[in-house]
Image (cartoon, rainbow, N blue to C red):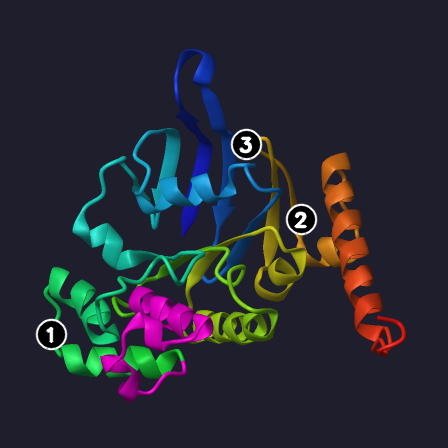
Amino acid sequence: MIKVDELRVSFGSAENFVRAVDGVSFAVAAGETFGLVGESGCGKSTVLRALCGLNRNWQGRIVIDDEVMQPQRDRRFFKKVQMVFQDPYGSLHPRHMVNRTLMEPIAIHGLDHADARIVRALEQVGLGSSFRYRYPHQLSGGQRQRVAIARALILRPTILLLDEPTSALDVSVQAEILNLLVDIRKAEHLSCILVSHDLAVVAHMCDRVGVMNHGRLIEELTIADLENNRARDVYTQQLLRASLSYDRRLKAEEELPPMGHDAQ
């Protein structure tokens, strides 16, 4: 469904030149979820922006559903490929009700049965039709991200690009959104690329994962490899160890007894 060959993305010039993505290649099968992980600034979100057409300044080859992509995409492409962004507070217009937010892609693509499409999309993400006439400030962070997911789904795409879709949410809400995305992917048979720095999120959602460092894709792993710490590259091994120690620290903190007044 998705094939990327030798993707390169650069910013700046002369002394300010930065190669953000440097020769990245991978493929994603129909119905598969592929994860991209790595530290902040490694280029994983830049890969998504090139794939979805937000960044047109790239070199290499991108093939989506057997069609070679050009930097300029047509309307037909955006009906097939949609993206969910990291920040639900920034991705929704603060002065637009949910109804207008969901109506906009329907109007742009000239689709019929708008009311039915909106109701279906809201129900699909676990929100009732009563949410149609609320503003973003009247919604929680999790509800805003559900609206953002509904907006991405309303055109019935076949590919969903997910840029850290839970990192801006409270921990208590993250699992709900992840489980929702897993259910939607299965129900709609979507092909997905998930960008995350959280290996636990990737292990929960993905079939395979690519590890990025300094703009390069240095290793691909199955989730079984990830869970059993079978990384070959030194950087990936360090990433796994750091993630494991972080998880253990959180678990230890959760098991600590509450402090009394004397301890405080």
Residue 221's disc number:
2
- Left or right of 95: which side holds 244? right
Out of 249 and 119, give the one closest to the viewer: 249
Q: Which residue is mark 3?
A: 215
Residue 6 in the image: above or below residue 252: above
Residue 130 in the image: above or below residue 191: below
Residue in the image at 73% along x and 45% along y: 239
Residue 112's disc number:
1
Figure disc tally:
3
Q: Is residue 152 magenta?
A: yes
| Sequence-first tag of 3 and 2 | 3
Quadrant of the image containing the C terminus: bottom right
Mark 2 residue element:
strand
Residue 20 appears at what percent x and percent y? 48, 30
Q: Which residues are magenta?
A: 126-153
Residue 164 in the image: above or below residue 235: below
- Left or right of 88: which side holds 220? right
Q: Are marks 2 and 1 in contact (CB under 8 Å)?
A: no
Nearer the camera: disc 1 or disc 3: 3
| Sequence-first tag of 2 and 1 | 1
Residue 102's disc number:
none
| Sequence-first tag of 1 and 3 | 1
Residue 95 appears at what percent x and percent y? 22, 66
Residue 35 appears at what percent x and percent y? 56, 52
